[in-house]
């Protein structure tokens, strides 16, 4: 049995324009790294966190990774002692599923370290408990794609029903993260509790179109369906320059563009790497004009989920 | 060139539980028959209508078939005279797309008769104009599947974006039509104009699940996704015995069950013919107990659309 393991888990784009609260996908870059060590005796201890500017709790009972692992160990009735070291390699509060990536890396790593007592898919509820600590509710639209890779549909929470959606081979994602912060809780509170039925019909037409486009590898249909009439019009006001970034991405050839999760990151999908990079440059220009620093990531859709690094 | 033609166009189930206003599919039975004859000179004349108990207008300018054909002829700039004979072989006001089937049979027939100046898909707007005469609005969720066959997604009306959804080979449909009438206009007016965002999220999760289930041939997923939290709870009150019919269908092994279009017909989907027939018997029992006469139809999903009979 290995005594320690280093695991990468990917960042994720939740909502994907029209699929508010039900859809997400994983990217290859960025993501988080967790190093776990078996320690003598019981208890979970966080030994080190880098890249968080001191913002995450070092108390294992209040930390996303600690809580996920603790729930997992309780479930398999283990009192194994664990030491956690977390390298945040992506921005916090960015709308890229930062806490989900940490939680997934943690539960994936501990499951590996203990000889895989559970299947990868069955780890989901434990990572969701980590999300609850970070966001106040146990959402799955970041955790599920980070854990399973690819595009993932959360059809239902009660009971939990997670469906992998096959995606076209050459689908690339551009992500731009403006260095401003939007709290998930705030981004949720500004949404209207009631919406017009006629808008909902437009939305679920697009959701259906997006799923069909992904499964048919119909890039144009994917693009036509990436249209959100419910959430984006409200949340876009929290992101300076959003409309210009979106216009630039589409003018550069991206299929579609939207807010990643609750923002402020913005993502675009393209049908090849060259277009994805060009879209990224054009998106970055807007934030440069606004004197807002930004991080740019371009990668394929990540179809494998977490990865053992060491 | 043929001087006359006889065409069948299929009945359709719109909405399909969760897909209000965006989804529909065609069945093999029932449907409508239209016989068209070229006549000397110009003008459209309805010579005969059977099976409507005298309820449809014999005035070509106020009749679904007449209006559809008239729009088509105008578009191709033809003054060809046409005689229409319509055999209604399905109940009116049943929620089975009765006017759509007539309109589709009409435009399909006239296009054939005139040497196919247009592609089958491009006939859609003319049949939609026929729908407008019958229902007050140019909906496509019956017309499109009747014309194209199979499951059809209407992703958007503006611009019109119609997508065929591949379906599993052995998907069977049971339809029960209780002999009561629900007006489409009434069924639309009782809907709430505003809905809860959290209900909409449940709905579009199910829409996504239904599309994925159809395309993956995952019968269980199709069944789990056939769940409507927005429209069915309101419209079900217009159909006596609805909840019992639905329970019986599912107990008989149907994957799912819902209101067909705006009702009062109720449909169920099953993964083989035997189950579809058994579900039908059990559904019929409820209306028999309520002393309501009913018509039962069991068929495969119709993947070909209209058919030339003669």
Image: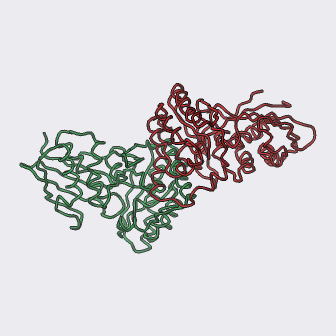
Chain colours: A red, B green
Q: Position of residue A185 (x, y in %)?
A: 67, 52
Query: Which quadrant of the figure has residue A290?
Result: top right
Q: Quadrant of the N terminus of chain B?
A: top left
Q: In terms of depth relative to the viewer, which is nearer, A294 or A130?
A: A294
Percent of width and height locating residue B107: 23, 48
Residue at the right extreme? A41
Q: Residue B270: image x %, image y %?
A: 47, 52
Does residue B304 sit above or below A28 in this rendering?
below
* Number of numbered labels in the structure image: 0
* Residue ranking furthest to the left: B40
Residue B47 occupies which quadrant of the picture? bottom left
Q: Is residue A155 visible?
A: yes
x and y percent of residue A194 in the render? 54, 61
Compared across the picture, whether B214 is left or right of A57 comes to: left
Q: Is residue B112 left or right of residue A204?
A: left
Q: Is residue B155 left or right of residue A34?
A: left
Residue found at the far bottom of this picture: B291
């Amino acid at each position: 049995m290995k005594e320690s393991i280093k695991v990468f888990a990917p960042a994720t784009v939740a909502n994907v324009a029209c699929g508010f609260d039900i859809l997400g996908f994983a990217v290859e870059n960025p993501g988080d790294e967790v190093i776990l060590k078996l320690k003598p005796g019981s208890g979970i201890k966080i030994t080190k966190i880098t890249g968080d500017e001191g913002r995450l709790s070092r108390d294992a009972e209040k930390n996303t990774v600690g809580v996920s692992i603790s729930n997992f160990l309780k479930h398999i009735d283990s009192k194994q002692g664990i030491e956690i070291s977390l390298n945040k390699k992506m921005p916090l509060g960015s709308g890229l599923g930062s806490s989900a990536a940490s939680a997934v890396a943690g539960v994936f790593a501990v499951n590996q370290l203990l000889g895989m007592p559970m299947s990868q898919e069955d780890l989901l509820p434990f990572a969701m408990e980590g999300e609850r600590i970070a966001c106040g509710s146990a959402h799955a639209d970041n955790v599920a794609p980070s854990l399973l890779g690819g595009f993932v549909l959360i059809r239902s929470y009660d009971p939990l029903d997670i469906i992998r959606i096959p995606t076209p081979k050459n689908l690339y994602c551009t992500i731009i993260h403006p260095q401003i912060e939007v709290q998930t809780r705030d981004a949720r509170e500004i949404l209207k509790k009631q919406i017009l039925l006629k808008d909902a019909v437009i939305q679920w037409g697009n959701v259906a179109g997006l799923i069909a486009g992904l499964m048919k590898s119909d890039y144009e249909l994917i693009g036509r369906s990436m249209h959100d009439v419910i959430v984006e019009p409200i949340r876009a006001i929290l992101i300076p320059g959003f409309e210009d970034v979106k216009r630039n991405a589409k003018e550069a050839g991206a299929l579609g563009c939207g807010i990643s999760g609750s923002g402020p990151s913005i993502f675009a999908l393209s049908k090849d790497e060259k277009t994805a990079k060009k879209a990224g440059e054009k998106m970055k220009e807007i934030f440069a004009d606004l004197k807002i620093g930004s991080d740019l990531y371009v990668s394929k859709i990540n179809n494998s989920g977490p990865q053992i690094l060491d």
